[in-house]
């Protein structure tokens, strides 16, 4: 469950970051927002996300930390 929460946090951060960069730097950054959205959409249908694979490769698992 922890890895899904991290994934949602990363996706939200990327969307907000790319919107800020699109506003402050160049509208071309909005393509990154579209990329994140399309990736989220395809993962809903295929149940596979590249960021999940990267996080698992880095050693994160689905276990929640123990209190």
Image (cartoon, helix red, strand yellow):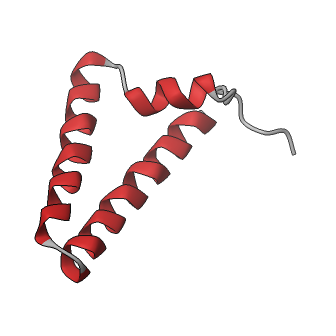
Residue visible at 22% across and 55% down?
33
The image quadrant of residue 56 is: top right
Marker count (numbered): 0
Observer-nearest of 64 and 54: 54
Residue visible at 62% across and 38% down?
2
The image quadrant of residue 43 is: top left
Observer-nearest of 20 and 3: 20
Observer-nearest of 67 and 32: 32
Residue visible at 66% across and 26% down?
61
Question: Which quarter of the rendering shows the N terminus?
Answer: top right
Q: Position of residue 42 (x, y in %)?
A: 21, 28
Question: In the rendered view, does 12 fall on the left or right side of 23?
Answer: right
Q: Position of residue 60 (x, y in %)?
A: 67, 30
Identity of the residue furthest to the bottom in this view: 24
Question: In the rendered view, does 61 fall on the left or right side of 15?
Answer: right
Observer-nearest of 25 and 41: 25
Where 3 sits versus 23, above or below?
Answer: above
Q: Position of residue 50 (x, y in %)?
A: 39, 27
Where 12 sits versus 25, above or below?
Answer: above
Question: Which quarter of the rendering shows the C terminus?
Answer: top right
Residue visible at 23% across and 53% down?
32
């Amino acid at each position: 469950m922890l890895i899904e929460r991290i994934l949602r946090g990363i996706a939200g951060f990327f969307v907000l970051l790319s919107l800020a960069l699109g506003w402050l730097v160049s509208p071309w950054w909005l393509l990154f927002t579209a990329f994140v959205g399309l990736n989220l959409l395809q993962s809903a249908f295929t149940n596979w996300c590249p960021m999940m694979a990267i996080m698992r490769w880095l050693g994160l698992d689905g276990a929640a930390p123990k209190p």
